[in-house]
Image (cartoon, rainbow, N blue to C red):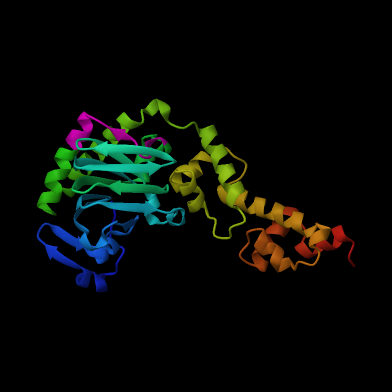
């Protein structure tokens, strides 16, 4: 499971285009396949794969035939645009091994495997493997109260819904864009994929709101000193959509942004009144507290405490 890591200008030099899709060969082919995962092969010179993709509204259907390869999705990639998607893959031949959340899951011919791109993963594709798979927006999964954490790497064997899904996906990628009513087909594909997820994660195992809120606060506590932390990053970090996160926190006293801001201010005040840090400038304290700049820090501190950072430091350290 991958998708173009090479820009359009160089793509023609790396691949040959056939009626059945895009052929990727050698080291350049591995680079082409590397998008959501970084792929490598023990025998890069003899690597060969073919990818066919068809877009159906908000979902993308793919077929991948490949020689042996290993794909790694690193922690540094989490939070990118693809973190908002899960994949449901039907193994048509060969086998794959998925490692997510320190758990190994093996899927063989006829099995269905779920992959969460909002988490790090290792994907090992055996020689001669063929997969047909669909990318589902995370929001569509959350809307049915599935917990993506329970789906990561889940494998289903002899799944009726999985066989039905494969039966729909196969002709779609064989016939390309020859679909008359895209909306109806899109809904059918999504519903079948969600039926597969229902088997992997029954509704009664959906996460409790209180537990999710606790995870939100824990995530903020671990990352609030990062100036790039945003509401969207928090949502991805706890595997929910931004919209669902806002709804989840409606009963709380502050919004997610407010929680982040107040936590940064609290850290900033702690640093301002620490006599061991008296030599640090206020700008340095702002950055250590997670603020992008001095003016942003000053406004936030004044809004929360009613005093400026300079006033807090002067009063606490007895400076004139």
**What percent of the width, then of the height, locates residue 166?**
18, 39
**What percent of the width, then of the height, locates residue 18?**
11, 62
- Relative to 317, say whether 165 is above or below: above
x 34%, y 43%: residue = 98
Q: Looking at the image, can residue 60 be seen?
A: yes
Please say whether residue 152 is one of the residues in the magenta stretch.
Answer: yes
Please say whether residue 132 is one of the residues in the magenta stretch.
Answer: no
- Relative to 57, say whether 212 is above or below: above
| Foreground pick, 17 / 138 | 17
The residue range painted magenta reads: 150-165
**What percent of the width, then of the height, locates residue 173?**
15, 50
**What percent of the width, then of the height, locates residue 319?**
89, 65
- Residue found farthest to the top: 204
Residue 81 is left or right of residue 278, and the answer is: left
Residue 12 is left or right of residue 221, and the answer is: left
x 29%, y 55%: residue = 2
Q: Looking at the image, can residue 312 be seen?
A: no
The number of numbered discs placed on residues in the rendered structure image is 0
x 36%, y 35%: residue = 144
């Amino acid at each position: 499971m991958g998708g173009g890591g090479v820009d359009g200008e160089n793509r023609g030099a790396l691949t040959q285009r056939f009626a059945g899709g895009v052929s990727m060969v050698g080291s350049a082919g591995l680079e082409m396949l590397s998008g959501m995962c970084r792929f490598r092969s023990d025998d890069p010179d003899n690597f060969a794969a073919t990818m066919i993709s068809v877009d159906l509204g908000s979902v993308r259907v793919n077929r991948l035939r490949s020689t042996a390869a290993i794909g790694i999705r690193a922690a540094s990639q989490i939070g990118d645009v693809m973190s908002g998607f899960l994949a449901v893959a039907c193994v048509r031949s060969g086998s794959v091994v998925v490692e997510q959340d320190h758990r190994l899951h093996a899927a063989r011919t006829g099995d269905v495997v779920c992959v969460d791109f909002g988490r790090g993963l290792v994907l090992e594709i055996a020689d001669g493997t063929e997969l047909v798979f669909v990318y589902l927006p995370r929001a569509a999964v959350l809307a049915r109260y599935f917990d993506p954490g329970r789906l990561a790497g889940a494998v289903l064997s002899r799944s009726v819904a999985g066989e039905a899904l494969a039966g729909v996906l196969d002709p779609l990628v064989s016939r390309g864009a020859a679909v008359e009513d895209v909306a109806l087909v899109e809904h059918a594909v999504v519903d079948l994929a969600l039926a597969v997820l229902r088997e992997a994660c029954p509704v009664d195992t959906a996460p409790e709101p209180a537990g999710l809120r606790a995870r939100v606060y824990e995530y903020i506590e671990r990352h609030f000193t990062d100036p790039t932390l945003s509401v969207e990053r928090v949502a991805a970090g706890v595997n929910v959509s931004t919209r669902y996160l806002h709804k989840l926190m409606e009963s709380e006293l502050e919004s997610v942004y407010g929680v982040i801001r107040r936590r940064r201010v609290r850290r900033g005040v702690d640093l301002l009144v620490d006599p061991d840090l008296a030599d640090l400038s206020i700008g340095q304290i702002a950055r250590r507290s997670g603020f992008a700049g001095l003016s942003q820090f000053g406004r936030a501190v004044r809004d929360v405490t009613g005093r400026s950072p300079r006033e807090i430091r002067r009063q606490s350290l007895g400076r004139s």
